[in-house]
Image: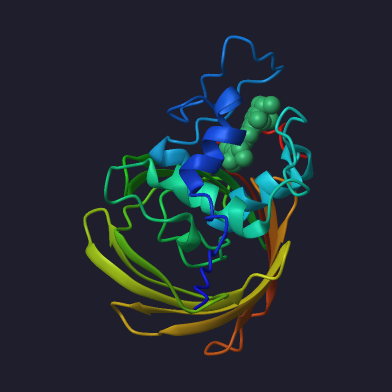
Amino acid sequence: MILALLVFAQTPTDSGAALYGRMCVACHGADAHGHPAATTRLAVPPADLADCAASSSETEDQWTGVVLKGGSAYGLSLDMPAFGEAITPEDARRIIRYVRSLCREPGWPPGELNFPRAFVAEKAYPENELVATLSGREQELIYERRIGRRAQIELNVGTVLDSLDRPFDHSAEPYVAVGAEPVRGLAFQGQVIGSVEEGEGYAALTWVAGVGRRMGRVAPELEATGTAPRGGGSTVTLVPQLWMQLSRLGHVAMSLGLQVPVKRPDKRAKLAAFMLWDYGDAGLLKGW
Ligand code: HEC
């Protein structure tokens, strides 16, 4: 009788933690907080990969790309090597899932919900951003600062060139914004804004609904928005737009759009543009 013994000598797939321990520890540190080993010499400090704010605001795809293509492909330092020759894309993803799991605080919205900024709808994602907008002859500077996991404060300074007697326009506008990706790659954004004017109380309700699709460094989007003022005379405007990533890191972007009034056809269409810098991600000169 022959006893056949089969041994499946299959190498077990390494866990993300094991791969991290082998390839990343020397620079990013055992706890992934970016403390390199004493023997490691680097020109720039390695990123803190375990920081909740940092890991949650990027997408898994972006960080997996950094690992495979290296920092330089994203305008980062050459000190972050490319591992594309050494490991498979699946392994790179496994490592990134592991480092992202090191953030143990619940409630940080994932970067996958951080859609390209639209013209009208406010992003339902807290960020540290500086945005300069141009719409017809009106300019606006928006400063946003994230507070904790899900909140942000926002300061707007609008300069209306054709009413120089009232160059700064401050108003209270509480709003609710939503973002969702029901189909992969298709982003829906919506918002409802209430306008409250000094001494007058409720003045108008504004709604926005938009859909966009990210395709590499560009994202065509279409938004529809309308206002319903207390005294009647509601409006509807369509805003086709094209969002473009400018920096390789993706922290500087711009968008061009056309505001086409459909409910008030007496008003003419106007061009609009904005430029934004996610200063929470990297300095303005970094990442190109
Ligand atoms: C030789 C040192 C070194 C090794 C090894 C290394 N890194 Fe890095 N890494 C860096 C440095 C330095 C930076 C910061 C680059 C910059 O800020 O310009 C960085 C940046 C990154 C970033 C970008 C973070 C951000 O904020 O966008 C990610 C993600 C990353 N590393 C993941 C990894 C992973 C995962 C491994 C292991 C597979 C690894 N790194 C191995 C040095 C290293």
Q: To which quarter of the image does residue 265 belong?
A: bottom right
Q: Position of residue 215 (x, y in %)?
A: 70, 70
Q: Position of residue 12 (x, y in %)?
A: 52, 55
Residue 3 in view of the camera: yes
Q: Nearer the viewer, residue 105 or 38?
A: 38
Count of number-bearing discs: 0
Instruction: Relative to 245, say whether 76 is above or below.
Output: above
Q: Residue furthest front?
A: 1
Residue at figure coordinates x 60%, y 48% from the top left = 63
- Name the side, left or right, on which 44 lies relative to 182: right
Residue at figure coordinates x 49%, y 78% from the top left = 1
Residue 283 in view of the camera: no
Q: In which quadrant of this rendering is ligand 1 seen?
A: top right
Q: Nearer the viewer, residue 168 or 32?
A: 32
Q: Quadrant of the C terminus?
A: top right
Q: Position of residue 167 (x, y in %)?
A: 53, 44
Instruction: Relative to 198, say whether 208 is above or below.
Output: below
Q: Position of residue 268 (x, y in %)?
A: 67, 79
Q: Nearer the viewer, residue 266 or 101?
A: 101
